[in-house]
Image (tube, helix red, strand yellow):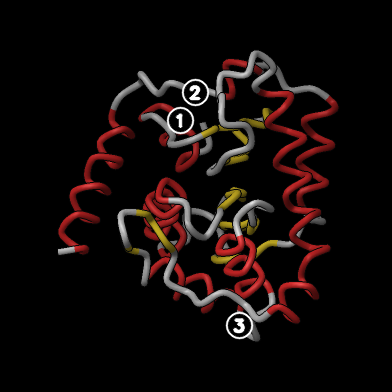
Amino acid sequence: MRNRFLLAFLLLLGSLVMFPSQPVRAQDAAPQAADHDLQFWEALGHSYYVQEGTRGPLVYLFLEPDCPYCHVLYDWLQNPVSTGKLRLRVIIIGFPNSPSSMGKAAAILGAKDPVQALKENEKGFAIRDGAPEGGIAPASAALSQKQLGKLQRNFAFLAGKESLLDPQGVQQSGVSTPMLVYRSGKQVQYVLGLPDHQQWQQIIHGS
């Protein structure tokens, strides 16, 4: 029953990519490439991420383990990654006010094989007790504490950039995921939430 509800939920989310009426379009807020965009792009290389793929244009995805939109977007990106069209760097985020979020993020970053841990989280993603949850078990208190600095750094990247992209407070809930960062030509582009069709084509084809 849970899987049936999850499937219906994900299909509803997936339909959003086909329409250009996405409520939050970050590149509308920052249409021009600038020095600070390039600096941010370079700085992301010093974040704590999990990389998948070895060929194609580079895309960064800010992902929180219990986020259903992150789950949908991660699934969408698997095909272009597996076929060598994209290199994906997943920047793991834990929300400080959520023990589940922080614990699962720490479990992924602190795993012996972070790629496998991330895949375990997404493969086991489900709706439990009416709430979306990633499939990995939260880390122990000791491991969570050990990974805290990395998670704080990743969170600072996301919070700082979202505050610039959304100065009018369109996202009333504050910092949220997912966020995509990629390059189209010489421009650094951002997507808050799920990409629309045009954005998806830019991500896949880099144009």
The part of the image, by quadrant, that contains residue 31 is top right
Give the Cα separation between the discs numbered 1 and 3: 31 Å
Name the residue located 40 percent from the left edge and 50 percent from the top edge: 68
Q: Secondary structure beneath disc 1? A: helix
Residue 158 x %, y %: 70, 42
- Above or below 51: residue 171: above
Residue 26 x %, y %: 58, 24
Name the residue located 62 percent from the left edge and 32 percent from the top edge: 174
| Mark 1 / mark 3, whichever is N-terminal | 3
Say which residue label 2 marks: 24
> Is 70 situated left or right of 95 in this image?
left
Q: Could you tell me the amino acid type at mark 3?
A: Asp
> Is 78 situated left or right of 139 in this image?
left
Q: Could you tell me the amino acid type at mark 2?
A: Val
Tell which of 104 and 35 is nearer to you.
104
| Mark 3 / mark 2, whichever is N-terminal | 2
Name the residue located 79 percent from the left edge and 38 percent from the top edge: 40
**Marks 2 and 1: in contact by CB < 8 Å?**
no
Q: Nearer the viewer, mark 1 or mark 3?
A: 3
Say which residue label 1 marks: 199
Say which residue label 3 marks: 113
**Marks 3 and 1: in contact by CB < 8 Å?**
no
- Above or below 196: residue 97: below
Q: Could you tell me the amino acid type at mark 1?
A: Gln
Name the residue located 62 percent from the left edge and 40 percent from the top edge: 181
> Is 116 situated left or right of 40 in this image?
left
Assess disc 3: are there few (<14), some (14-19) or many (≥20) residues with their C-alpha within 10 Å of its C-alpha: few
Q: Secondary structure beneath disc 2? A: loop
> Is 79 situated left or right of 104 in this image?
left
Give the Cα separation between the discs numbered 1 and 2: 12 Å
